Amino acid sequence: MSRRIPLDLKHLTEAERVFDLIVVGAGGAGLTAALCAAIDGARVLLIERTAQVGGTTALSGGTTWVPLTHHAATVNPHDSRAAVERYLDLAVGDRAPRALRQAFIRHGAEAVAHIEAHSEVRWRACARHPDYLSELEGSTVCGRALEPLPFDGRQLGALFALLRAPIPEFTVLGGMMVDRTDINHLLGMKRSLRSARHAARLLSRHALDRMRHPRGTRLVMGNALVGRLLLSLSRQAGAHLAVGTELVELHRQGGRGRIDAVTVEQGGQRLRLGTRCGVILASGGFNRHPGRRAALLPGIDAAWCPGAPGHTGQAQDAAEAVGAVPGPAGLSPAFWAPVSRRRRADGSEAVFPHFLMDRAKPGFLSVNARGERFVNESTSYHLFGLAMQRPENQATPAWLVCDQRALQAYGIGMVRPGGQGLAPFQDDGYLISAPTLAELAGRIGVPPQALQATVARFNTLAARGEDLDFGRGVTAYQRNMGDATWRGPNPNLGPLEQAPFHAVQLWPGDIGAATGLQTDANARVLAASGEAIAGLWAVGNDMHSLMGGVYTGPGITIGPGVVFAWLASRDALSARSAATASPSSLPEPSNA
């Protein structure tokens, strides 16, 4: 495929402008759909609006929530379909069609096995990664969350430049990616010989990388998953990728029939491309569509969104123009996380999601404009973000507060653990610090007496290990978010005692779309009548969430994205007639 990337569409002959399948959007779901189609012998075109592939998947942790795979048996052999169904029925209820999650459960393991058997994509089960609503019957603490294996980006050769880089603030030492295993070793390298060796390998590899590459080539998390998908796609003879190419219009045969063509724009030129099987939409959702955003997320500034830039919702506009409709309302039209923001040296703004490292650890609490707690800080980032938006909480923005011990142990947001190098963060106002709680309150604009009373109350609860106000640290998920080495009675609760005290401002950031196009259990896009629009599928965040806006576990956007990409590809190619020309008889692009 490297000969065919990037594909310059204007150089194609008329015959070359007809593909078996066209996939719109090169994030995790789109790459998977294109890969699965190519594996099955299709001549497939993957178009990507931006100059790089990966979408928000490349920026994410890459966790892939798919229950009952062969990997799950290695850590949780007792999980069952009945347990998964019970959990999702309780969590999601009637917020989304049960048929969608039934299809996901039924086909998930098969999709993962098929992709791994025919590509370089590799996952492993996390030894402990609880479902987010672990208090519900049917939940588990491990087995359903898969993480991509680390990947050597050097295998991509020149294609490495096409891979969207991770959020810089999620890397260390100028572009070295680290996952939770690496972080634990780096933090423990002075206490453990094993950790010291692991850290030495990481650092030496990165030093060599920086002599040849603008960033580290040892890829983990979402970057590893996208890198593996891209490498796999590059090895398929029938796969083609066009970047800097956006969907303008979908065309139905005879105006009302099957989707048989698209109009795209590349380099300022519009071109019509034909498709024998149809189109799979995987453009990432509506999050950067001004109109849809205003309607679905009123009052939420797009500057708070940490997602990739290509999620413009234009593909959904094109789908609605041919009769598609959005799915029904669920718990929320988007998925959320508390984010902090900081201006980078190059003038761009970093938007940092607070997923894991700080808010649920001992020595942290969050307060609203009244200087009062408003949420269980160890709940999922989605529920945290929703709590910020409730008007009665007055928590947009909110503040994450900690003492010096907590900052040194865990860091806070973009500030690394260790407590060193604080001056730049303090100078630009990202980190607010003060010798007393009263002074900190004055600097962040909350009532001093209220903040002092909140911390005093919290410290009393931390001493007894029981959060009587919000129930922090009572579920398996919450306790997993805490500090297992904490000597107190609750791994999520520790007092704020050691001056100075610190605060970082938080905003509710939409990390992905939950509202998308209504589909059936094969990801076929539905019209208002409930009938499928022939030749049109939607996956990833273009597909209405089968979770109904409920965040049930780590990777519940990527997991369904992968599974329904496989289902959509299989369904699309099943429509090929015996008269369709075989891929080997189709011409390759003239600029290949």
Image: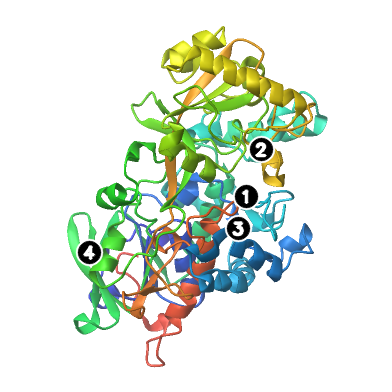
Q: Position of residue 452 (x, y in %)?
A: 57, 14
CA distance for labels 3 and 2: 26 Å
Q: Which residue is mark 4?
A: 10
The earlier-in-sequence mark between 1 and 3 is 3
Q: Marks 4 and 3: which is nearer the front? A: 3
Q: Position of residue 152 (x, y in %)?
A: 59, 48
Q: Quadrant of residue 85?
A: bottom right
Along the line of sight, which residue is nearer the eye, 39 or 553?
553
208 to 132, vertically: above or below: above
Name the residue rendered at 60%, 50% in the picture. Answer: 151
Q: Position of residue 41 (x, y in %)?
A: 47, 78
Name the residue rendered at 70%, 44% in the picture. Answer: 475
Query: Label 4 sits on what residue type?
Result: Lys
The earlier-in-sequence mark between 4 and 1 is 4
Query: Label 2 sits on what residue type?
Result: Gly
The earlier-in-sequence mark between 3 and 2 is 3
Q: Secondary structure at mark 4?
A: helix
Q: Secondary structure at mark 3?
A: strand
Left or right of 115, for residue 317: left
The earlier-in-sequence mark between 4 and 3 is 4
Query: Label 1 sits on what residue type?
Result: Tyr
Q: Quadrant of residue 325?
A: bottom left
Q: Which residue is mark 1?
A: 132
Q: Which residue is mark 2?
A: 471
Q: Marks 1 and 2: which is nearer the front? A: 2
